[in-house]
């Protein structure tokens, strides 16, 4: 259980008996439907409710252990799946929500939480200010308000007011929480730090509120001056001065803004490594040239190699990429970086990291191998757009006004349905290329067309929206056929997309705001949907249908299915994905090797059989 739950129970220990059973929970429940759901526990354990007391642990903790939340189960089986105890994940989630709420009510946690929220303290006016700023698409997102309100419950239980959020009190307060609550609390504190630019919010926080204590101790905060110098170096390297045109006063870009973020991260890692190893005093630097010199180079590379052995989130591939980027940015800024490149070619650890970047990652290969060997997963993979649409329709099938959570679920599922239809029945586009699609306005590149009796959508992906801008795709057609790609996309445009405020003509006319032109729309503005949000939505939605995956797994899945049928399909796969055959050879060569090995095994089996 979490910090708030523990504090609540401690506060009520004098009035609530220490021992509670599920029979107590059932007796205190009035609603017959809820009593029936609680009674199912006796059927599940084949034991009277009076014997279900949690054993040596708290009743709620016992329930959470035996019946975890869906996000913890993921694509795994439900409890009691061998007996088909629940018809679906939806029915399990509803049952769990009801029973868990009744347990919390019996334990006094609901009353304790209500009492906390009714308390008049420093949080009361602060939450009122935040609530006002969240109305009518204000600067505080409703999700952010919810996160801060949940954090305020934990803070109130510990007797902490907004003005007490200082570096002395907050770190030990966070350390007492379970990991998931600590992460959620850190998110709320960062949100407060972002929004303190508003005077009415800053007035309720300490004058020097700055949650730098949320940065892990392994990561040394860098001065703003160093970050600015890093950004300047990356920006200088971004433009090829040899291509300068005095008429347009412009140069050719060597890489895009998103790549520039990656390059800045590499130089930040270099500066941190120099500081952590003692090779340089970063805070005293007024120029970054010394970070590229031999003492720092040796110390930083050794530090990264050691980090790859102790930090699960840092690999030799990352270390090799950092060395390559540092050499590239340094050279573009007129610094000598030959020794960096020599290390990249000669150091065995960096060679291993570089080689890892030339093949498919372990998690992607696992996904592809599972897909090859599981026909049911192949069917799910190729029908995702229909499955997401069905779930979205289920959410929308109500006569009542949608709740906020239902609306967000419908938006998420309809977006995933359209993205999947575009990928499965159109072409295996990268996430960025798909999110750049526009269905109206001057930049429109998705069109509804008819040729005779044939209906189809045509998507024209500009070369500038392709990775590296080196591939130009022909127009992509999503045809009206029995595989429902056209139908799902048509449904999304007429039903799913208008669920987003800034894609709804009526809302935009009422609010006098611009109508979104992109196919995939942000929830908060007329801007296109962000890549991170699509990543979150598809990860969650795919887990719900039993095939957890990421947006880029569409491309890996298509290539794997084509090449597993025949290695001679490389040309078709390259055309479908908009890449070169050489790229397929590099990342999918393991399929060819596996096929050849199996062919040899078959030949030997025939020889053994005397054929």
Image (spheres, rainbow, N blue to C red):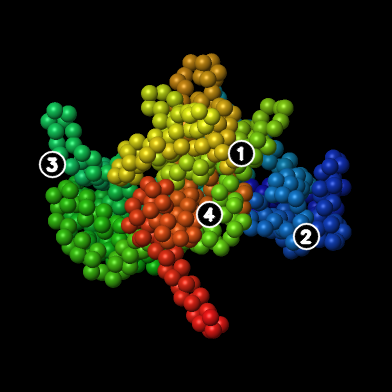
Label 2 belongs to which residue?
Answer: 83
On screen, residue 578 versus residue 554, left or right, reads left
Residue 313, by quadrant, is bottom left
Nearer mark to the viewer, of 3 and 4: 3
Camera-side residue of 562 and 558: 562
Instruction: For label 3, count other residues whose C-alpha is less than 10 Å away and answer few (under 14), some (14-19) or many (20+).
Output: few
| Pointers 2 and 1 in contact (C-beta within 8 Å) | no
Q: Secondary structure at mark 4?
A: helix
Task: Measure the C-alpha gap from mark 3 to mark 4.
Answer: 54 Å
Q: Secondary structure at mark 1?
A: helix
Mark 2 lies on a secondary structure that is: helix
Q: Say whether disc 2 or disc 1 marks the residue closer to the N-terminus.
A: 2
Residue identified by numbered label 1: 389
* Structural distance between the alpha carbons of marks 2 and 4: 41 Å
Residue 242 placement (x, y as % from top left)? 13, 41
Instruction: State the mark number for residue 175.
Output: 4
Residue 3 can be seen in this image: no
374 w.r.t. 399: above or below? below
Say whether residue 434 is left or right of residue 175.
left
**Residue under label 3:** 242
């Amino acid at each position: 259980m979490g910090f708030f739950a523990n504090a609540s129970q401690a506060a009520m220990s004098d009035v609530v008996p220490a021992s509670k059973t599920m029979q107590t929970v059932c007796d205190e429940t009035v609603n017959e439907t809820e009593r029936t759901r609680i009674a199912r526990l006796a059927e599940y354990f084949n034991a009277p409710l009076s014997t279900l007391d949690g054993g040596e642990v708290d009743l709620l903790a016992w329930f959470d252990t035996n019946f975890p939340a869906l996000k913890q189960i993921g694509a795994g089986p439900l409890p009691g799946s061998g007996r088909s105890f629940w018809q679906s994940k939806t029915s399990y989630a509803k049952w769990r929500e009801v029973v868990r709420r009744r347990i919390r009510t019996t334990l006094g946690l609901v009353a304790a939480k209500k009492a906390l929220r009714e308390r008049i303290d420093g949080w009361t006016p602060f939450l009122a200010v935040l609530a006002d700023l969240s109305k009518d698409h204000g600067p505080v997102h409703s999700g952010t308000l919810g996160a801060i309100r949940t954090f305020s419950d934990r803070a109130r239980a510990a007797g902490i007011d907004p003005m007490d959020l200082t570096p002395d009190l907050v770190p030990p307060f966070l350390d007492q929480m379970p990991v998931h609550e600590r992460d959620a609390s850190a998110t709320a504190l960062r949100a407060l730090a972002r929004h303190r630019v508003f005077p009415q919010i800053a007035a309720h926080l300490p004058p020097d509120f700055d949650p730098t204590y949320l940065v892990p101790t392994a990561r040394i905060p860098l001065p703003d001056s160093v970050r600015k110098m890093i950004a300047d170096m990356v920006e200088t390297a971004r433009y090829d001065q040899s291509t300068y045109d005095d008429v347009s006063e412009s140069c050719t870009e060597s890489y895009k803004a998103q790549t520039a973020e990656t390059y800045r991260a590499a130089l930040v890692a270099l500066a941190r490594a120099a500081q952590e190893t003692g090779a340089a005093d970063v805070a005293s630097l007024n120029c970054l040239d010394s970070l590229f010199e031999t003492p720092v180079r040796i110390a930083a590379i050794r530090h990264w190699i050691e980090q790859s052995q102790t930090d699960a989130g840092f690999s030799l591939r990352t270390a090799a990429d950092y060395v390559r980027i540092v050499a590239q940015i340094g050279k573009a800024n007129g610094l000598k970086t030959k020794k960096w490149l020599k290390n990249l070619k000669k150091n065995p650890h960096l060679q291993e990291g570089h080689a890892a970047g030339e093949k498919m990652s372990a998690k992607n290969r696992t996904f592809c191998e599972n897909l090859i060997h599981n026909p049911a997963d192949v069917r799910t993979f190729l029908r995702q757009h229909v499955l997401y649409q069905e779930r979205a329709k289920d959410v929308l099938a109500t006569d009542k006004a949608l709740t906020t959570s239902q609306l967000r679920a419908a938006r998420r599922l309809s977006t995933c349905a359209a993205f999947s239809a575009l990928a499965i029945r159109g072409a295996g586009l990268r996430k960025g290329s798909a999110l750049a699609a526009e269905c109206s306005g001057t930049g429109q590149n998705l069109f509804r067309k008819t040729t005779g009796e044939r209906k189809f959508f045509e998507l024209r992906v500009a070369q500038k929206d392709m990775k590296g801008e080196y591939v130009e795709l022909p127009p992509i057609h999503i045809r009206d056929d029995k595989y429902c790609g056209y139908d799902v996309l048509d449904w999304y445009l007429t039903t799913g997309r208008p669920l987003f405020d800034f894609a709804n003509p009526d809302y935009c006319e009422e609010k006098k705001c611009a109508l979104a032109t992109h196919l995939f729309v942000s929830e908060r503005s007329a801007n296109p949907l962000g890549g991170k949000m699509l990543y979150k939505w598809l990860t969650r939605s795919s887990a719900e249908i039993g095939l957890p995956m990421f947006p880029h797994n569409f491309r890996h899945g298509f290539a794997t299915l084509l090449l597993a049928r025949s290695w001679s399909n490389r040309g078709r796969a390259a055309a479908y994905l908009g890449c070169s055959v050489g790229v397929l050879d590099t990342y999918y060569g393991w399929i060819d090797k596996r096929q050849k090995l199996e062919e040899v095994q078959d030949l030997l089996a025939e020889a053994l059989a005397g054929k």
